[in-house]
Image (tube, rainbow, N blue to C red):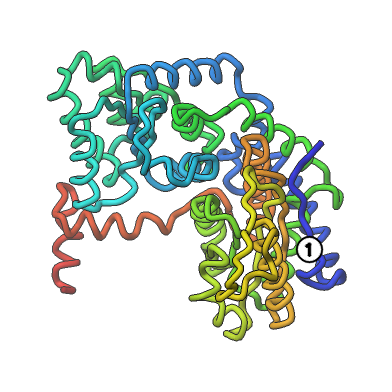
Amino acid sequence: MNQIQVNISQAASQEAIQAQAEAARKALATVDQATGAGNDFLGWVNLPSTIAPELVEDICKTAADLRDKCDYVVAIGIGGSYLGAKAVIEALSDSFAAYRNEHTKTKVVFAGQNIGEDYLFELMRLLDDKKFGIIVISKSGTTTEPAIAFRLLKDMLEKKLGKAKAAERIVAITDAKKGALRQLATEEGYKTFVIDDNVGGRFSVLTPVGLLPIAVAGYDIKALLQGAQEMEAVTRDDSQANPSLVYAEARNALYQAGKKIEILVNYCPKLHYFGEWWKQLYGESEGKDGKGIFPAAVDFSTDLHSMGQWIQEGERTIFETVISLEKQEHEVLIPLDNANLDGLNYIAGKRIDQVNKMAELGTRIAHVDGGVPNIQITLPALREEYLGQLIYFFEKACGISGYMLGVNPFNQPGVEAYKRNMFALLEKPGYEKETAAIKARL
């Protein structure tokens, strides 16, 4: 079976990693047996192997219906409600499809992940003369950023089509029974999918939250789930054959050695948003109780010309996890130029990918020599099956690593602080005391 591989030979000493083995095995058991803090949010652990086939078929049918009716579908959500879908769609998409005048494929665009006024204005201007639909993703229906976007776009769609026809192009992914969005969906007759109570947002890529937008974009969610199921089986093992266990051991060994920052590196620009998804997964899971590795992400070789100096010679508190893409989908050769003014004839006839891989290898060697430990994750290709493996690999490793760190990997109490301040500053009803207190500080 082709699957992702993890290489920790340049990460830490065998002794340091071996010292983590017992804690890692205990943490793995805690995840698999659901015996730790936050165990009511472990619905993702067996999800790939237990997701109902009829649910997958329903998602595919709903996606096909949206594609039939719409040129654009807006996926509205924030955090885990959009990053996973965005990561997979970007990884599988033609980099320049947006610039071509294509009318054969429904485009998925995103809203509700920011409060940018110009962003929303420009999105509405784009959709003004287009056939569009909406996938709104929110457990409560009251999260500020997606609620604003949904109010605007729902109003726009209803004015364009009328309430009844607009309802046929709106899908709500929300709580099974309660919340503002569930109430609205019931009243208006929207097609709905459920966000299960036992799956947190950042672990929800392989639920309807991520699967529906990915399917609308035209990608094979069954292959994505198959890859995740393969990795689910592999990561039950409590030996070094378990890549999630190996990764968790290495990063915790490095953390204990003073490496407080992990940089996720890619050498393929299509993986940029995968880094964004990974940052939320690890930042929100581990950053609490005064602990946690700080997750950052860079796109090489681009960022070598901006961040390379700091990585090579800055404070030695970092380590790198490099996603190495084994196989490209296309082949481009560097041509011979008789004048050779740029001095590139020494690589004439070589594939661009060969040059990229040598840039990757040379950079890894230089950074290790410069005191930056390195973990390498090899991804066979940018295909649904392997992305499903990668998603589940990181999710399982996150649960293991969080328990090794001694935190609850499945809550996020710190996220609420900014919301309370924002509500107070906006004078939301019910926040009168907070409004008075915060204005006194200004």
Residue holding disc 1: 8
Helix or strand or loop: what does disc 1 sit on? strand
**Residue 25, position as x, y percentages in the image:** 80, 52
Question: From the viewer's perspective, is residue 183 above or below residue 411?
Answer: above
Quadrant that contains the N terminus: top right
**Residue at horizontal 38%, vertical 23%?**
177
Mark yes or no: residue 390 visible.
yes
Identify the image quadrant of residue 440: bottom left
**Residue at horizontal 35%, vertical 39%?**
109
Q: Nearer the viewer, residue 152 or 440?
A: 152
**Residue at horizontal 16%, vertical 60%?**
435
**Residue 244, position as x, y percentages in the image:** 73, 50
Q: Nearer the viewer, residue 60 or 348?
A: 348
Mark yes or no: residue 292 visible.
no
**Residue at horizontal 46%, vertical 28%?**
212
**Residue 281, position as x, y percentages in the image:** 54, 52
Question: From the viewer's perspective, is residue 281 above or below residue 387?
Answer: below
Left or right relative to 159: residue 387: right
Left or right relative to 420: residue 208: right
Quadrant that contains the C terminus: bottom left
Q: Nearer the viewer, residue 431 or 409?
A: 409
Q: Residues within 10 Å of mark 1 (few under 14, many from 20)?
A: many
As shown in the figure, which amino acid type bears the numbered disc 1?
Ile
